[in-house]
Image (cartoon, rainbow, N blue to C red):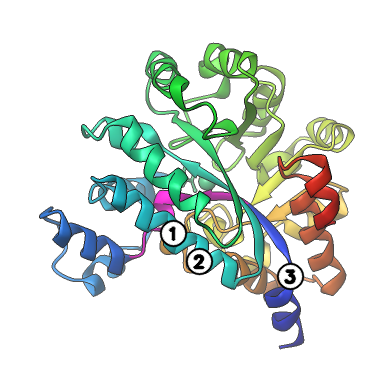
Amino acid sequence: EQLRNIVQGMPKAELHIHIEGSLEPELIFALAQRNSVSLAYPSVEALRQAYAFTDLQSFLDIYYAGASVLLTEQDFYDMTAAYLKRAHADSVRHAEIFFDPQTHTARGVPFETVINGIWRACQDAPISASLIMCFLRHLSEDEALDTLEQAQPFLDKFIGVGLDSSEVGHPPEKFRRVFERARALGLRLVAHAGEEGPPDYITSALEVLNVERIDHGVRCLEDPVLVECIKREQIALTVCPLSNIKLRVFDVMGEHNLRKLLDAGLKATVNSDDPAYFGGYINQNFVAAFEALPLDASHAKQLARNSFEASFIEPEQKRAFL
Ligand code: ES4
Ligand code: ZN
């Protein structure tokens, strides 16, 4: 109870949130109606019932289906505004938000519709927010390069690039050239690695792609040499506890390795990933992990501090948060 209050009022940054994963079933239905899109589910309840995942891929199939209701700039605005309002209520002071343009351009939605809607909501937000454009790793590197090309006129609207979607079988090195190009453009670099994929994918994300943060990265503990490297380089891990349970990265929260990551001296953070699908926004991720694991108020403070330290905000603003 006391911990709940500490977590609730604690200023924090959210560094791992897929904006398409914040689309609540109610909003999916409202947008489907507004856009005359037909859904494979008869009701909000039926859709929610389908949120029973066995692994990353079973989630992604439903996540991409949910995103199919997004057609207009206003749709992207409304989705993003709803997330930012909800994050503000959880004492999030700064969010670095992933978006997946390829999920939408593949359906014929123009790139500019996607980014303009999301970006405008960030401008109007009650908190500080910036955008990270993710490449879908199940698609080719040439498609990622083409997406980066389409993004050129909008370089002032996002701060970095990331890598998400189906991990196993799509190692970071598949995207070496596109990350090299993004780096040359002055963009910040992150990648999902070591969620379902092996620790080797974390190593190649760091060494081949030169990423500055690892999204998830929980499997790093399987490789002691890698742990030393992550610690030495102070690479942050954006951990998502509820996601890891829903997608069966860990069987139960009591087996999650968040405490072990902190004890190993790693800069772990707590985040919501796809809150509409995994059963909770950032504070619910804190509470679920803290109820199941030997973590106390000092760990909560450390995690909040880590979230600002690991953020891509300018040093001056960062000092104001710390
Ligand atoms: C994702 Cl949990 C997760 N992993 C990889 N890609 C994703 N896209 C949205 N959520
Ligand atoms: Zn993610």
Identified by mark 1, the residue type is Ala
Q: CA distance from mark 1 to mark 2?
A: 6 Å
Outermost residue to the bottom? 1
Taking the image as drawn, is residue 62 in sight?
A: no
Taking the image as drawn, is residue 277 in sight?
A: yes
Displayed quadrant of residue 281: bottom right
Q: Quadrant of the N terminus?
A: bottom right
Indicate which label's residue lies in the foreground, 1 or 3. 1
Q: Which residues are magenta?
A: 15-24
Local SS, label 2: helix
Displayed quadrant of residue 103: top left
Against 58, is 185 above or below?
A: above
Displayed quadrant of residue 197: top right
Residue matched to label 1: 81
- List x then y, in percent, for residue 311: 72, 45
- List x then y, in percent, for residue 136: 42, 31
Identified by mark 2, the residue type is Lys
- Asked if the residue at tag 3 contacts the one at tag 2, i.e. Cβ–Cβ closer than 8 Å, the answer is no
The residue depicted at 68 percent of the width and 73 percent of the height is 292
- Asked if the residue at tag 2 contacts the one at tag 1, i.e. Cβ–Cβ closer than 8 Å, the answer is yes
Label number found at residue 293: 3
Residue matched to label 2: 85
